[in-house]
Amino acid sequence: MSQRIKRVSELLKRELSSVLEKHYRFDGVILTVHDVEATPDLKQSFAYIGILGTGINKDFVIEKLNKNRGAIQREVHKRIVMKNSPQIFFRLDQSVERGVRILNAIDSLPPPADPLPEGEEEAKMG
């Protein structure tokens, strides 16, 4: 990925986060923009959204964002001046939830066994 595409992706991520924070709120839900990947031709970009909250259908939130994509893009593209502004497509990113599950699994493991004292260790080896 070229430096230009990386810079555009990071700029889109920052401005998209700001627009979503100001204009799009869901009750009991926190939206986070984990990553934005722009295609090499800069015609499309994919925003990976993390949704934190309980009792909400995450697919519904992503669907709602995609339905309001035009208005969201207008707000973002007002802030970013480019010759061709990429279309933004929203996708659900569940990496945080996976990470939490893995950390909980690690925390539930039994503690490691105590090491043997030095004298007993040598006796077993030799």
Image (cartoon, rainbow, N blue to C red):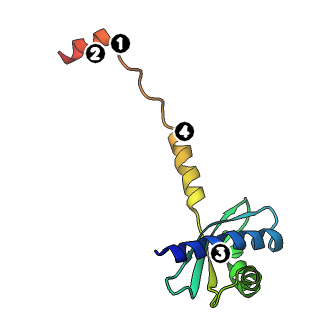
Q: What's the residue at 80%, 61% (across, down)?
A: 28
Amino acid at circle 1: Pro
Sequence order check, earlier mark of 2 and 4: 4
Q: Quadrant of the C terminus?
A: top left
Q: CA distance from mark 3 to mark 1?
A: 58 Å
- Name the spot of residue 21 as percent of width and height, x first: 78, 68
Counting residues from the start of the chain, the first of labels 1 and 4 encountered is: 4
Measured from the top left, where is residue 31 in percent x and y?
72, 65
Q: Could you tell which of marks 3 and 4 lies nearer the N-terminus?
A: 3
Q: Does 84 sit above or below residue 117?
A: below
Whether tag 3 and tag 4 are in contact, CB under 8 A, the answer is no
For marks 2 and 4, give the CA distance.
28 Å
Query: Circle 1 sits on which residue?
Result: 117
For marks 3 and 1, give the one nearer the viewer: 3
Residue pointed to by mark 2: 121
Identify the residue at horizontal 64%, vertical 82% (top origin). Answer: 88
Q: Which residue is mark 3?
A: 12
Label 4 amino acid?
Answer: Asp
Q: Is residue 19 left or right of residue 94?
A: right
Q: CA distance from mark 1 to mark 4?
A: 26 Å
For marks 3 and 1 on the same chain, the one whose residue lies earlier in the sequence: 3
For this rendering, which residue is in front, 95 or 33? 33
Are the residues at dot 2 and dot 1 in contact (C-beta closer than 8 Å)?
Answer: yes
Q: Kindly identify which residue carries mark 4.
A: 107
